[in-house]
């Protein structure tokens, strides 16, 4: 039998509710993190590593790789925010965009538009930055599509996303 059930059955409901309230306050104000918060923190830390990988790839003029890691940065940053809201997400691409909008629609901030813009822009390059594909009868490789300008824009969007997400997670005492 759960200890809370035993306690609840042996005391007046006002005292029980007070104990639950105080326990919650202590828990929320301590550094004890839920599993969701730990996932959020880890996703964010991984996004920072991907951001550095994107920067390195851009310096080496590997533009498809820079865009791929920029996209991964944004995706993992968004997943960090979603984990902080107790949402476990394994999707990417357009479905991730709609999930992000749905989860945050009641607390939408202007800064979230930056994240949305980054998701929309970089989703197109999720596979195009890694695999050849057929376009109008011609086989196109990632280096045929992803230019320096696309890579620079992707990196810029990823940097802004990391900043917005970092601020969000700091406000929630996750990082």
Image: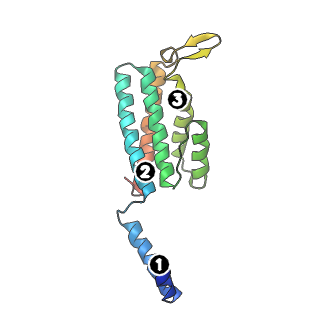
**Compared to 43, does 70 lie above or below?**
above
Residue located beneath label 1 in the image: 4
Residue 156 position in % (x across, y down): 44, 32
**Compared to 45, does 54 lie above or below?**
above
User: Can see residue 152?
Assistant: no
Mark 3 nearby-residue class (10 Å; few <14, some 14–19, many ≥20): some
Residue 9 position in % (x across, y down): 51, 86
Q: Is residue 131 left or right of residue 26?
A: right
Residue 89 position in % (x across, y down): 53, 46
User: Can see residue 16?
Assistant: yes
Residue located beneath label 3 in the image: 126
**Compared to 56, does 114 lie above or below?**
below
Mark 1 nearby-residue class (10 Å; few <14, some 14–19, many ≥20): few
Q: Nearest to the eye among marks 1 and 3: give it.
A: 1
Which type of secondary structure does the marked residue at label 3 adopt?
A: helix
**Compared to 48, does 36 lie above or below?**
below
| Residue drawn at point x = 45 percent, y = 78 percent | 3
Sequence-earlier tag: 2 or 3: 2
Sequence-earlier tag: 2 or 1: 1
* Total count of labels: 3
Residue projecting furthest to the right: 136
| Residue in the foreground of this view, choosing between 131 and 111 | 131
Residue located beneath label 2 in the image: 39
Sequence-earlier tag: 1 or 3: 1
Q: Nearest to the eye among marks 2 and 1: give it.
A: 1
Residue 45 position in % (x across, y down): 37, 44
Which type of secondary structure does the marked residue at label 1 adopt?
A: helix
Which type of secondary structure does the marked residue at label 2 adopt?
A: helix
Q: Are marks 2 and 1 in contact (CB under 8 Å)?
A: no
| Residue drawn at point x = 55 percent, y = 38 percent | 92
């Amino acid at each position: 039998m759960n200890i809370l059930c035993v306690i609840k059955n042996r005391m007046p409901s006002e005292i029980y509710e007070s104990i639950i309230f105080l326990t919650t306050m202590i828990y929320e104000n301590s550094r004890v993190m839920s599993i969701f918060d730990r996932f959020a923190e880890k996703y964010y830390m991984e996004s920072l590593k991907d951001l550095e990988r994107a920067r390195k790839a851009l310096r080496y003029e590997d533009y498809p790789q820079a865009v791929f890691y920029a996209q991964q940065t944004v995706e993992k940053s968004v997943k960090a925010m979603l984990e902080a809201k107790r949402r476990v997400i394994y999707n990417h691409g357009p479905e991730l965009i709609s999930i992000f909008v749905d989860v945050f629609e009641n607390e939408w901030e202007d800064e979230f538009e930056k994240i949305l813009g980054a998701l929309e822009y970089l989703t197109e390059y999720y596979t195009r930055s890694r695999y050849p594909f057929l376009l109008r009868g011609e086989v196109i490789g990632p280096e045929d599509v992803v230019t320096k300008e696309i890579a620079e824009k992707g990196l810029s969007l990823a940097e802004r996303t990391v900043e917005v997400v970092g601020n969000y997670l700091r406000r929630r005492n996750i990082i």
